[in-house]
Amino acid sequence: MSDQAAVVDRGHRVRVAERCREITEARWFATAVFLLILANAAVLGMETYAGVSAGWHAELQTVEHLFLAAFTTEMVLRAGAHAARPLDFFRDPWNLFDLVVVLAAFVPAARENSTVLRLLRLARVLRAARFLPQLRIVLVAVGRSLPGTVSFLLVGALLLYVYAMVGWVFFAGHDPEHFGSIGRAVLTLFLLMTLDGLGDAVHAGLAISRWSFLYYVTYVLIASFVLVNVLIGVVINSLEEAREIEKAEMEAAAGKTASAGVGADVGDGVGGGVGVGLAVDEAGVRERIAAARRALDDVEAALSSLPPPRAHARVDGPWE
């Protein structure tokens, strides 16, 4: 492909990207896709009723095919919006998620397995987060809080094990229903972490020993107040980080849109022959550069033919 053909192809891809971007960034497009996702969720809910699924099986299959066609068209338009720079499409995690959910429905192994197919159709409902900024921020915050949550779970598991062993040592003989084994003790303390049945547990413990009050009080303070507040702090911190990320992405998207608008103007110039930059005749530019080089060579030759300047001698008087 020649340089001129490459320039023209680039201009065509820029125009295609601009037209697809006008559609995908329109408010009506986002509203229509969001309504399609809600309708898909409603149809999935209807299929859980045996009477509806048996009596309207063919109609539901047709509706599913229409949904798949609509979502496929949406993905084609979103990919077309990145025709000028195709790799930018894959840098967006939401685009990757949508692409996997939509294309997986065309895999023969998935289409033949009804359970997998229903899970894939259910995954489309999660795409609603793309059109709800606040929900998207919450999901990002949950993802960013996972490392801190894992640490919280490890500390909580260690706390449960220690208190369960202590409870088994002191209460197994008197209350085997709740502390007869390490498993029952862990289950009892896990329920107490939510303060469920705390009063009954304290009264039963006091009937065994007055020191049981100290056991339950320290456990509730550490598990239900300290650890839970630590977890809330981790989630809130992740939520703030998610808001900052969302703000940065919106600013970056605004910058890309502005630059894309400039590129589209240049691309339109290529198609119409009146633009600046890409529409310039390449052969004419090369001819002008060659003429400028020849002119510089002539100037250099003329300067070299001039006689050297006369040397002046300094005397007591003025210059002569």
Image (cartoon, helix red, strand yellow):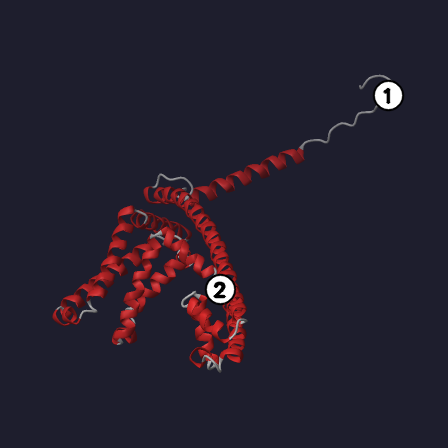
Viewer-proximal residue, 13 or 62?
62
Q: Is residue 57 above or below residue 131?
A: below
Instruction: For the N terminus, give its image quadrant.
Output: bottom left
Residue type at the position of mark 2 = Thr
Q: Quickly name the residue at label 2.
A: 149
Say whether residue 239 is visible.
Answer: yes
**Where does residue 312 sit, x and y in percent of width and height?**
80, 25
Task: Please give the label number shown on residue 4.
Answer: none
What is the secondary structure assignment of the residue under circle 1?
loop
**Where does residue 155 sit, x and y in percent of width and height?**
53, 68
Q: Left or right: 23 with respect to 193?
A: left
Q: Which residue reaches farthest left?
A: 55
**Where does residue 249 sit, x and y in percent of width and height?**
44, 50
Q: How many marks?
A: 2
Rounded to the nearest angstrom, the CA distance separating label 1 from label 2 is: 92 Å
Residue type at the position of mark 1 = Val
Q: Is residue 216 above or below residue 318?
A: below
Q: Left or right: 101 with respect to 308?
A: left
**Where does residue 111 sit, x and y in percent of width and height?**
26, 73
Q: Quadrant of residue 76?
A: bottom left
Task: Please give the label number shown on residue 315.
Answer: 1
